[in-house]
Image (cartoon, helix red, strand yellow):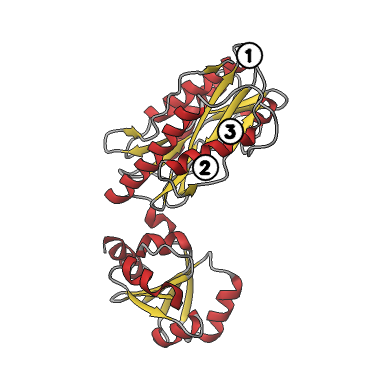
């Protein structure tokens, strides 16, 4: 109920009588209902979960503290019964235009767009436990895959093995499409696994994660197949140092932009600044990209029990790329790394 209390405080602060919650991440966060076929309507005193008859038992089991309403003629007809004429009702700005148009035309209330995603930024004990488990699965998967990869394998073979192994450890699915980018393809930060064959001398970047009990992990590691690639080994060591320095700068009270600056300044000092083309990290939770941005543009101040990623990288066209990423819990006096897989440069030979 603490999450509902947080949301009700938001209602009071915005002089609202209620809120329609329509996005799955927020439906799950505030009710723990695990189907996307639902809508929440929450007032200062009551909490309603509206769904269809297929989910009646599931909703009553999962959504503790909610009045479960099973609709017969759609969500709108139930909202018409619940919403008081003339009241101030918030709705998520991510709502589709079609749904908003229907609601604004039929509900006799004042509808106001809002964004409540940031209410998920600070994790509670249960969330941290689930994210730790997701991170543990991801870390063990790296330990497994470096003993699986051999020259001559296709990137997709590697990705499929990773996904299978994460599920064997209890993950429900990937938290996003698994990235396996080898050789020159490593210059693509989001180079999802292809039919390219991994060859001797290729650096391979793995960026992947899983979902455990509804919560995500997100880890990146890069390793070398073979022994010889002097320029990329140099770049690896620069990225590794930048990532470690950025992680060490994390603690409650520090601006996210300062963490980004630590990584960016180090890479720039080594002459590769223009090849670090994305932000240093992001929030992590129910979504693999929770609202926090660890970037030069962010005005966010880190708070205790936020979870962020730290993932600097260098990407050079026709050469390759390196990225190293950890999931990091912000603590009062510092940080705790949740992804334990080794960052030592690993060289895989036949």
Above or below, 112 relative to 184: below
Residue 112 shown left or right of residue 56 in the figure: right
SS of the residue at dot 1? loop
Above or below, 313 relative to 21: above
* Cα distance between the residues tagged 1 and 3: 21 Å
Residue 234 shown left or right of residue 20 in the figure: right
Residue 317 shown left or right of residue 91 in the figure: right
The residue closer to the viewer here, 171 or 231, is: 171
Residue drawn at 42 percent across, 86 percent down = 86
Residue 341 at least partly seen: yes
Q: Earlier in the sequence, mark 3 or mark 2?
A: 3
Q: Which residue is mark 1?
A: 229
How far across and how far down the image is residue 206, in percent? 55, 32
* Cα distance between the residues tagged 2 and 1: 35 Å
Give the quadrant of residue 68: bottom left
Residue 260 shown left or right of residue 128 in the figure: right
Q: Earlier in the sequence, mark 2 or mark 1?
A: 1
Mark sitting on residue 70: none
How far across and how far down the image is residue 284, in percent? 43, 45
Q: Which residue is mark 3?
A: 158
Q: Which residue is mark 2?
A: 297
Above or below, 291 relative to 191: below
Q: Check the image and name the residue furthest to the right.
A: 318
- Of tags 3 and 2, the one toward the viewer is 3
SS of the residue at dot 3? helix
* Cα distance between the residues tagged 3 and 2: 36 Å
User: Mark 2 touching mark 1, by CB under 8 A?
Assistant: no
Q: Earlier in the sequence, mark 1 or mark 3?
A: 3
The residue closer to the viewer here, 109 or 208, is: 208
SS of the residue at dot 2? loop
């Amino acid at each position: 109920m603490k999450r509902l209390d947080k949301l009700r405080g938001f209602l009071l602060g915005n002089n609202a009588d209620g809120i329609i919650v329509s996005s799955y991440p927020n439906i799950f966060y505030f009710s723990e209902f695990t189907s996307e076929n639902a809508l929440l309507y929450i007032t200062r005193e009551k909490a309603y979960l509206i769904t269809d008859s297929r989910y009646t038992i599931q909703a009553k089991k999962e959504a503790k503290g909610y009045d479960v309403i099973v609709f017969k003629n759609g969500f709108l007809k139930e909202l018409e019964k619940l919403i008081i004429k003339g009241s101030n009702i918030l709705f998520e700005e991510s709502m589709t235009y079609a749904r908003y148009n229907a609601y604004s035309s039929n509900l006799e209330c004042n509808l106001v767009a809002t964004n409540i995603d940031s209410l998920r930024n600070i994790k509670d004990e249960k969330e941290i436990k689930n994210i730790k488990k997701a991170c543990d699965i991801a870390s063990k998967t790296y330990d497994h895959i470096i003993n699986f990869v051999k020259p001559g394998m296709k990137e997709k073979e590697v990705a499929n093995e990773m996904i299978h192994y994460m599920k064997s450890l209890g993950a429900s699915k990937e938290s996003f499409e698994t990235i396996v980018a080898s050789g020159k393809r490593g210059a693509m930060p989001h180079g999802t696994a292809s039919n390219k064959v991994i060859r001797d001398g290729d650096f391979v970047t793995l960026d992947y994660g899983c979902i455990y009990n509804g919560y995500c992990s997100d880890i990146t590691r890069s390793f070398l197949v073979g022994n010889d690639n002097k320029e990329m080994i140099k770049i690896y060591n620069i990225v590794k140092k930048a990532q470690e320095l950025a992680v060490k700068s994390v603690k409650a009270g520090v601006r996210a932009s300062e963490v980004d600056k630590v990584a960016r300044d180090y890479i720039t000092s080594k002459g590769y600044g223009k090849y670090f083309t994305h932000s240093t990290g992001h929030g992590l939770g129910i979504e693999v990209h929770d609202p926090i941005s660890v970037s030069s543009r962010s005005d966010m101040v880190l708070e205790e029990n936020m979870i962020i990623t730290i993932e600097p990288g260098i990407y050079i066209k026709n050469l390759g790329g390196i990225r190293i990423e950890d999931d990091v819990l912000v603590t009062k006096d510092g940080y705790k790394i949740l992804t334990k897989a080794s960052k030592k440069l690993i060289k895989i030979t036949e």
